[in-house]
Amino acid sequence: VIADVSPTLPLTGTRFRVSYLVAATASEAEARVRSIALEQTVEFPEDLLPDGWLRAEMPGRIESLAPAGAEPGWYRAEISFPEEAAGGDLLQFLNVLFGNASLQPGLRVIDFELPTRLSRGPRFGVAGLRSRLGVAGRPLSATALKPMGLPVAELALQAYQTALGGIDIIKDDHGLADQTLSPFQLRVERCAEAVAAANRETGRRSIYAPNITGDPREVFERAKFARDAGAGAVLVAPGLAGFGALRALADDPSFGLPILAHPALTGSFVSAGAGGIDPGLFYGTIMRIAGADVSIFPHAGGRFSFSHATCAAIAEHCSRSQDGVLPAFPSPAGGMSVARVPELKSFYGDDFVALIGGALHREASTLVEASRRFVAALAGEPV
Amino acid sequence: VIADVSPTLPLTGTRFRVSYLVAATASEAEARVRSIALEQTVEFPEDLLPDGWLRAEMPGRIESLAPAGAEPGWYRAEISFPEEAAGGDLLQFLNVLFGNASLQPGLRVIDFELPTRLSRGPRFGVAGLRSRLGVAGRPLSATALKPMGLPVAELALQAYQTALGGIDIIKDDHGLADQTLSPFQLRVERCAEAVAAANRETGRRSIYAPNITGDPREVFERAKFARDAGAGAVLVAPGLAGFGALRALADDPSFGLPILAHPALTGSFVSAGAGGIDPGLFYGTIMRIAGADVSIFPHAGGRFSFSHATCAAIAEHCSRSQDGVLPAFPSPAGGMSVARVPELKSFYGDDFVALIGGALHREASTLVEASRRFVAALAGEPV
């Protein structure tokens, strides 16, 4: 038996709440929620916890529990956790939120309050990115350099043409890593030069966003290289590089570029049967508190299967008012086209990044003209 | 239209195969698999691909497609990808395997061949870890220091007691990060000292494995600190830190410690409705090729819901013969007890790491005695 070992340190005395949907019968619901509250914190038999602060405050605490509306067999539970469980660490916050709990069926994270020490978001956000690009009053435009396998000179030519056509953000396709066919450093130098050359002609401030996704050392080496080579933003897939990579880059004053988050390998989080994490919360709030200035996700009616309701929830989470956390741009993608721009505008308003990838090559006989049409459509001009 | 831009570089000429289960009707199955093959590589309209190598070899290629046994509405498809798509990069391999595809419903990764350049696994593996611990002929024993919120002195006392009782691997609970109540550096120093002190008494070689999960900079700083402080292994949760963190640590000759992989936040990968990644493949092969010497997962009949078949598949994947990839230890956990050791031994044989966490505190009146009973049970001695 562990004796009372109440901490002698100053404690915050504050707790943050997480809301879950929990599959359970009426008779087992409270016990199940209680077991989740323990699992996500002390992970210890409750009766063996020492007396004092640790037993009273360290475990998750059930703040509310009630049937979840019209869904029979599901309960909505709010569990509060002491700020001491997460510390100031985004990864440990995600761990408390859903670490071991992700291994349980019938459990979905649907909302949370952010611990005080984690109340920060993207470095630039909507206003900051608009200011860097010099674009107001219309959605931003973005495209992706592709297909994988093209030599660097061809990718750089695409970067030049799309920037000349006025596209704001020209990103690497998320499948461009450091393969021999388009090695990272050469690609970044050439594409950044190409966008700069186009900007000199147009007088605009289009930016190139290379994919810097990599292991813990690579992601920082690539970030530094990209910044020094003149990239105006970077693309990171946190499902591959980890959410800590985004947060660390956004927190690093010596880096100082906007970050686009790509959803590669994250789909299972939001499609885990009836479990997982709410997609609005995941692609909106979690990407934003991880430091994404732009969160890319598949728009309804493209090559993927997100519903309009899901996309609306993501956009709402990207702009929801939250102390200390700037709004981020939602970036609907995955099979978009110029013809769908009016629909996207009426759905998302002005504060989104429209992303057309491979399909841009279909929009006109040249990529420059296709890009012009795309940007004109976003500005509400006749195409 | 992009002209033929076939690469002038030497190409590997080799492809690796990935097997998927795909939900589809008979009439749409081939088109769906074809779209996945494009999505995971060129992500580009097929008719706009340039002629030559890029059109012929870069996209995924359907190698086989047939109804998936008894499951109506499901097809088993093998898609091959050129090694050039993944390069030598584990993260890009995972991206090709399931990056954007994770966002599609009704798609499950069930097997793959590893690209030649990625045919490496843990640094130590089963034989190497046994050799470091000096333990042959029985499963290894492991426990976790907990509960979260205990001061460092108490955690170190647990480390001492469990090592004195003969437990081989004493790891941090995965919820111990760098919170104020047990700061990382102080905890690692004290717990490593405690295990060393116990080893001096027992003559054994028990090891302490601190949790070094963190953002890209922290994970390497913590790894180095842990090694210098005398830790004998480390614990990393790749669902939080990213799979690249494991691989980079396993590849780093200046680090040189065994790695335990914790499954926090990975549950959605294997429970994504009918999609996601096969759990044997995920907790067995993927953890192993990421560099885990030990892969922790919830055993059937504990606090989680993995089936016996799933656990058997994970163990099989951990030991499956694969060129250049050492076998790893499966480590069933999540609500185990000494009473279940015989069952675990008959299920997993000798090459597994039995992990009893909080429940160890129930096994005897002292933690030293509880640890002795645990190890005795693993050795097949009467408890």
Image (cartoon, coloured by chain):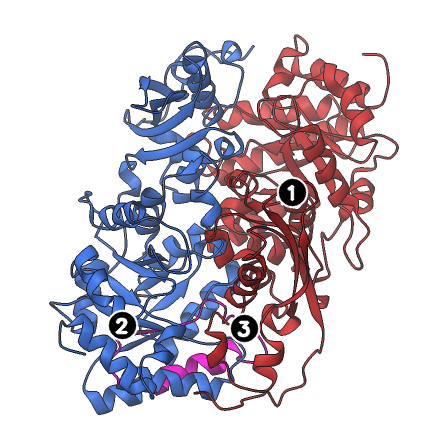
Chain colours: A blue, B red
Is B250 one of the magenta-colored residues?
no
Residue B202's spot in the image, x, y percent? 78, 26
Residue B37's spot in the image, x, y percent? 57, 65
- Checking the image for residue A6, the label placed there is none
Say few, some or many: other residues with alpha carbon within 10 Å of mark 2 (under 14 / 14 to 19 / 20 or more).
many
Distance from label 1 to label 3 (Cα)?
27 Å
Q: Quadrant of residue B167?
A: top right
Q: Tag 3's secondary structure?
A: loop
- Residue sitting at x 65%, y 57%: B77
Say whether residue A176 is left or right of residue B163.
Answer: left
Chain ID, mark 2: A
Tell me the amino acid under the disc marked 3: Asp
Residue A11's spot in the image, x, y percent? 32, 26
Q: Quickly name the residue at label 1.
A: B283
Q: Tag 1's secondary structure?
A: helix
Q: Is residue B174 above or below residue A138?
A: above
Say few, some or many: other residues with alpha carbon within 10 Å of mark 1 (under 14 / 14 to 19 / 20 or more).
many
Q: Quickly name the residue at label 3.
A: A178
Q: Quadrant of residue A236?
A: bottom left
User: As drawn, which residue projects farthest toward the front?
Assistant: B27
- Checking the image for residue A338, the label placed there is 2
Residue B66's spot in the image, x, y percent? 68, 54
